[in-house]
Image (cartoon, rainbow, N blue to C red):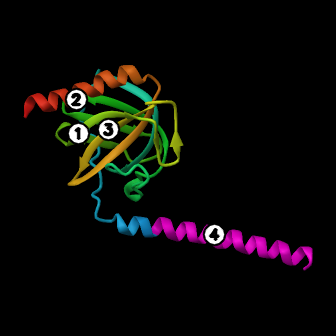
Amino acid sequence: MSKDVSTLIVIGVVVLLLGLMVAGWYARKRRQSHIAVPQQPPVDLPAGHPSFNGKYVSTTLAGDQLNRVAVHSLGFRGNCTIEVHPAGIAVFRAGERDLWIPRADVRGIVRATWTIDRVVEQNGLQVIEWTLDGTAVDSYFRMDDPEASDKELAGVVSNERQSQ
């Protein structure tokens, strides 16, 4: 077999694999089409509430760290800022749709070591467990100051439990 034929076979296999990856991504989006569009943060959010910078890692279906939510740009990693308000959590993502997680939808705040395509030191990820219009999801963050953000985020959960 000549070098040219071998090169064409390798290129063909690579193109086929890339095509299958794209087809798989769109199939995942079709399967998750029932998941609602997340709310945008309210435009009248007051200033002066705690704000934390970090990385938005991903959102997965609750309890399934390998099942990334692909719809509504929830599957893309990027820089973010989280603002903690008495009414909920605002997540401002660079280049993507911002998220508003109402306090009533927050199920818990926990720590994790890994999720889809990301492994960090023990308990290096912060997880906001929440309900997106009836679908339980987990959003993973890698915050620059995890201890401070943990304290503020836990306050949102504590406030929710006190108001029930």
Alpha carbon distance from label 4 to label 3 = 34 Å
Residue that appears at 24% across and 48% down: 131
Residue 35 in magenta stretch: no
Q: Is residue 82 above or below residue 76?
A: above
Query: Label 2, on which residue?
Result: 156
Q: Amino acid at mark 2?
A: Val
Residue sticking out furthest to the left = 164
Magenta part of the chain: 1-26
Q: Position of residue 91 (x, y in %)?
A: 35, 37
Q: Are marks 2 and 3 in contact (CB under 8 Å)?
A: no
Rounded to the nearest angstrom, the CA distance separating label 1 from label 2 is 8 Å
Mark closer to the chain start, 2 or 3: 3
Residue at image x 7%, y 34%? 164
Give the residue at mark 4: 17
Question: Number of labelled discs?
Answer: 4
Circle 2 residues within 10 Å: few <14, some 14–19, many ≥20: many
User: What crowding class fits label 1: few (fewer than 14 Cα within 10 Å), some (14-19), or many (20 or more)?
Assistant: many
Dot 4 or dot 3: first in sequence order is: 4
Left or right? Give the position of 146 relative to 120. Answer: left
